[in-house]
Image (cartoon, rainbow, N blue to C red):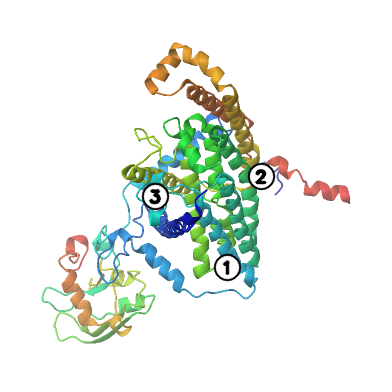
Amino acid sequence: MPEPASVLPVILVSLAKIAAVCFLLLTAAAYLVLLERWIAAWVQDRLGPNRVGIPLTKIHLFGLGQPLADGLKMIFKEQYTPAHVDKFLFVLAPIIILTAALAIFAVIPFGSLLACLSLAGAPGSSALIVAPRFDVGMVYVFALSSIAVYGVILGGWASNNKYSFLGGLRSSAQLIAYEIPMGLGILGVVLVSGSLRLDDIISRQVGGAWNFFTQPLGFIVFVIAAFAEAARLPFDLPEAEQELIGGYHTEYAAMKLLLFLIAEFLHMVTAAFLIVILFFGGWDFWGMQTSSFVDWPDGVLHVVVLMAKVFLVILFFMLVRWSWPRFRFDQLMSLAWKVMLPLGLVNLVAVAIIAEYGDRLAIPLGASRFGDYLVTHLHVSAKTMVAALIGWAALLLSWVAVAFAAPLHDDNRPRLEMHAFDEEKELRDNT
Amino acid sequence: MKATDPNIKWVAEPKLGMAGKMYLPLFVQGLTTTAKHLLGPKLTVSFPEQRPVIGNPLIYRGVHRLNRDEKGRVKCVACFLCATVCPAHCIDIVGVESPWPDREKYPESFTIDELRCIFCGMCEEACPVDAIELTSLFDLTGRSREEMIFDKEKLLSVYDQTQDAEPMKSKELGGTL
C-alpha cells in the first residue's frame, strides 16, 4: 500500500497513463483502418488509399493523411437520428461499446517497466500498465469483453430495424457461444501461470517456453475464439454486409458510427494483445535480458518487441479476412459447441496432467539420452519438454479425432430423398 | 417436373478426404493465395501522373476528329451519312456547295455534341471518305455544356493534335487516302 502522502502523485501518474493510452489507442485505431484498407487493396491487386498527405501541397506521404481526413469527415457529418428509433438507447449503445473496449486496456501491459517515468516523486520506475497490481486482470478483461455485446444488442434493438436486430441477435448468440472456448483457452494458461495478472503471465513465460509451445491446442482454440469475439471474418456474421446491410450499425451515421467502428478495431487490438501476452510471451524475445530489473533502454526495447508482435498478429487478422469466406450460422454454432468446446477441454486436461505429473514424467525423459540431448542443446528444462510433447500430442490426436467426427461438413444442397413428396400420388390418394 | 424425372441429373458433393476434413488444404490455399496477391503486381494506374496503355489506338473509340486531306482542307464531303446513322443524334452538319472542283459539297459547319455521343463508332464506319474518326483521347473534360459541343475547327484541331500518333488509314488498309 502506498503512503497517504504519495497518493496524489500516484493518481497523477495514473491519469497521465489513462490519457496516453486513450490517445494512443484512438490514433492506432485510425491508422489500423488505413492499414486495413491498404491490405484489402493490395490483396485485390489495387494500390489502396495513397493520395491524402499534407493539405494544399502535392505531398502524398503514401496516404498517411487519410485517417485524419476520414475522422474529420465523420465528425462534420450530420448527426442523423432516424425518427423510428429509441433515442436514449440509440445514443447509449455506441458509448457503452467504446467505453468497454477502451476500459479493457486498463489491465493490459504495454511493456515491462520504465525507469525514467518517475512523475512528481512517484516511485522510481513505473509499470507500463494503467492499473498495475490488479489481481483479477484476466477476469476483468473477460467481463468487459462481455459488456461490449450489450452495445451491439442495444444498437440492434434501439435501431428498430430488422437488419440491425438480426445483427444484434446473431452477435449475442455468437459471443455467448465463443466465450466458453475462449475461457477454456485462457484457463490452461492461467493454470500454468498461477495468476490472473497479465504481467505475471508474461513473466512466467520470460526465459522459459512460451505458452504457444507447450499448449498449441489451447492457442488454436483461443485464436479462433478471439476471431469470433472480435467479429472478424470468417466470423463477422453480426455485420455481414451481403446479408444484413451493416448489421447492428445499419441505422447509425457520423460520430456514432465512428464510435462503433473504433470499438470494433479496438476489439481486434485487444484480441491481438491477448494472443501475444498469453501465448507468445508478451515482451519476451530470444536473447533478451530476463532479470526483473530493467533500465530504460531495455524497457523501451520491451515495448518495441511487444508492439511488433501485436502488429504481426493484427496483420494476420487482416490477411485472414481476405483468405476465407464467412461461415454459415449453423456452421459457426457447431464449430463452437461441437469442435472448440471439446478441444478446449482436451487442452485443459492435458495442462492439468502436466501440472500434476509433469515433474514425475520429466525424470525418465531427463535421464534418457534423447532428453539429455534436448536439455543441453535447446536449454529448456525436462519438464517443459514433457509439457510440449504432451501438448503437441494432444493437438494432433484431437485434431484428427475432430476431422473424423467432422460435424461441420453438411451437404445442404437439394437431394433426391429430400424431394420424396410426390404431388401426383398425393392427389390420387386424396381423391 | 417431378424430382424423380429421369432427365434430372442429381449431383452429390464429392466426399472429403482426410486432408480436407482436417481443413489443412483450405488453410494453406487461402493464405498462399492472399499472400501471392498481397505481394504481386498491382493493376491500378495512378491516372494523372501515369497514363494507361491503350492496346491499339487505331481502333480505340475516344474523342472524334475531322481528318484533313493532303492539301489541308477538311476531308468531309457533307454526305450526312454519319449524322443519319448516329443513334444519339449528336452530329449536326450544315452542307453547302463546295468551292473546290473535286467535290460537290463541303460542310460549312460540323458540330458534334460530345455529351450526347455514346462513342459507338458508327459514324466512323459509315463515312465513305474516312473523314470522321475516333481517336484514343479519352480524358475529355470541359467546364460547361457549350464547351463540350465541338465545332469544325475544334474537330480539325483534334486531327492536328493526333495525326502523328494515329495516322489516317492508308489505301492499303482500306482507307481512301
Q: Amino acid at mark 1?
A: Glu
Question: Between B45 and A34, which is closer to the camera in this rendering?
Answer: A34
Within-10-Å neighbours for mark 2: few <14, some 14–19, many 20+:
few
Task: Tell me the mark number nearer the camera, choosing from 3 and 1.
Answer: 1
**Residue A300 to residue B130: above or below:** above
Determine the CA span between mark 2 and mark 1: 36 Å
Residues marked 3 and 2, same chain: yes
Query: How far across and how far down the image is residue A48, in percent?
Result: 36, 57
Question: Between A72 and B60, which is closer to the camera in this rendering?
Answer: A72
**Residue B142 to residue A155: above or below:** below
> Which residue is drawn at the image coordinates 61% and 45% (left, top)?
A178
Q: Earlier in the sequence, mark 3 or mark 2?
A: 3
Q: Is residue B12 visible?
A: no
> Which residue is drawn at the image coordinates 51% and 32% (left, top)?
A216
> Which residue is drawn at the image coordinates 38% and 52% (left, top)?
A118
Q: Secondary structure at mark 3?
A: helix
Q: Earlier in the sequence, mark 3 or mark 1?
A: 3
Q: Quadrant of residue A225?
A: top right
**Residue B23 to residue B38: above or below:** above
Disc 1 marks which residue?
A251
Within-10-Å neighbours for mark 1: few <14, some 14–19, many 20+:
many
Q: Amino acid at mark 3?
A: Val
Please identify the residue farthest to the right as the structure is shown: A431
Disc 3 marks which residue?
A43
With B150 as the anchor, is A355 left or right in this view? right
Disc 2 marks which residue?
A414
Query: How far across and how far down the image is residue B85, in percent?
Result: 35, 75
